[in-house]
Amino acid sequence: MTHEISRRILLRNLCGGATAGILARRFDGFSAARTQEQEHNGSRAAMFHIARAFMEKYEVPGLSVSITSHGKFAFEHQFGMADREQAQQLLQNSLFRIASVTKPITSVTIFTLIEKGKLNLTDKVFGPSGILDDKFCKPPYKRYVTDISVDHLLTHTCRGWPNDSSDPMFRYNSWDQAKLISWAIETLPLTSPPGLRWAYSNFGYRLLGRVIEQVTGQPYADYVQANVLAPCGITDMRIAGNKLKERAPNEVVYYGQYSEDPYKMNLTRMDSHGGWIATPTGLAIFLDHVAGAPNIPSLLKPETIKIMTTPGPAYPQSSPGKYARGWMVRNNGAGNWWHNGSLPGSTTIMVRTSSGMCWAALTNTRTQPSDEIDSALDQMVWDMVRQVPAWNA
């Protein structure tokens, strides 16, 4: 009897101990999961706070952010309003003007044509041996014009038509592209031989759009959509309209500050330098495809990417970031790549980091001075990403 009782007690104790061990392990697992969830929720709360502080400081009606890590979406959120007057909240499919974030898209398109053997960086753009021949200018050619190459346009070193008060892209809104290009070449002379100095040029990327059309025989937007965006699975990007009544389905309303009017520009004419509308989700997907990610094929070959992300020698060497060919880069492309965009009613940024993260953030306003909100938007996303140390951005 004593032995039986002892055996029962032993079994009970063993079973109780095993049950306790199982419960302890389950509790430990639950605690770990709960801790992870708390950390995740804490990170999201901190990210939300950073975004809303940015919006409050710069009076931003709407902000949309998408972040991927190694080809998978890690964070997406929309803050605020797509249309204040109609009380329409931003949605994941809300489209924004992306301004100069267009330029990397144009650059990637140029390099796809180079890989296909249809174009070379050294190809001249104007004159008898140029891609555009005398389509926009005829002999006698203005000084240095026939020296401009595709690479000069990509690297902003054509030595003319800079992004200042004389920028032709913001003049004569009623003119079509052919008239504007012909007028600029005839009226705004180059100041020195191409290749010697750097000056950011919207007009130069406008010309790259015409190069793409000439080489492919297709309208710029059609070729980009079919050969760059579609392979990424992006179907909703398009060139912006000019007026409020020309808004695309799901497009936000833009709000100018300090008397800026977002609807007094010819956005459609800016197609290849600043004309696309997109979601940040689409841009993050594009970034993941440019050089590839796990289970995502690259749009371009590694050797092509190296050329595209190598800074030109004319870019100021004192700058920590340098302009390559359609991208700002660090460490000669081995570091981060990025481009920002700014127009009345729009402030934008997209970034691809060396650690495998990609993101885009788009707003529907711009304040003055514009470079302040540009820098603040860039810093805002970095501050958000750093709330999750595991991302190792």
Image: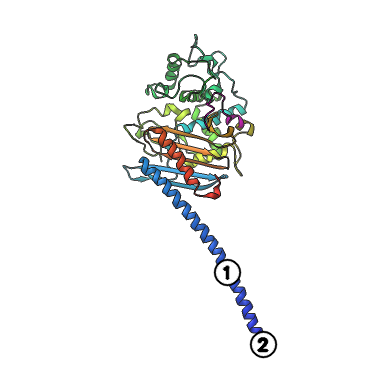
SS of the residue at dot 1?
helix
- Mark positioned earlier in the residue sequence (2 or 1): 2
Q: Which residues are magenta?
A: 306-320
Q: Could you tell me how many numbered marks the image carries?
A: 2
Q: How far across and how far down the image is residue 110, in percent?
A: 56, 28
Q: Is residue 95 visible?
A: no
Up-down relation of residue 67 to residue 26 (above or below): above
Q: Mark number for residue 24?
A: 1
| Residue at left offset 58%, top offset 40% | 354
State which mark lies toward you, 2 or 1. 1
Residue 111 percent across, percent down from the top left = 58, 29
Image position of 323 with respect to 252: above or below: above
Q: Residue furthest bottom?
A: 1
Check residue 214 in the rendering and tell me which mark sits there, or answer none: none
> Which class describes the residues within 10 Å of circle 1: few (<14), some (14-19), or many (20+)?
few
Distance between the alpha carbons at the discs numbered 2 and 1: 29 Å
> In the displayed structure, does residue 288 sit left or right of residue 99?
right
Q: Residue furthest front?
A: 318
Which residue is the site of mark 2?
4
Q: In the picture provided, is 85 more to the left or to the right than 119? A: left
Q: Nearer the viewer, residue 264 or 344?
A: 344
Q: Is residue 266 above or below residue 31?
A: above
How many residues crowd mark 2 within 10 Å: few (<14), some (14–19), many (20+)? Answer: few
Coloring scheme used:
rainbow
User: In percent of the image, x 37 and y 21: which residue is there?
Assistant: 172
* Amino acid type of the residue tagged 2 in the rendering: Glu
Circles 2 and 1, Cβ within 8 Å, touching? The answer is no
Amino acid type for the residue under numbered disc 1: Ala
The quarter of the picture where the C terminus appears is top right
- Name the spot of residue 276 as percent of width and height, x first: 46, 33
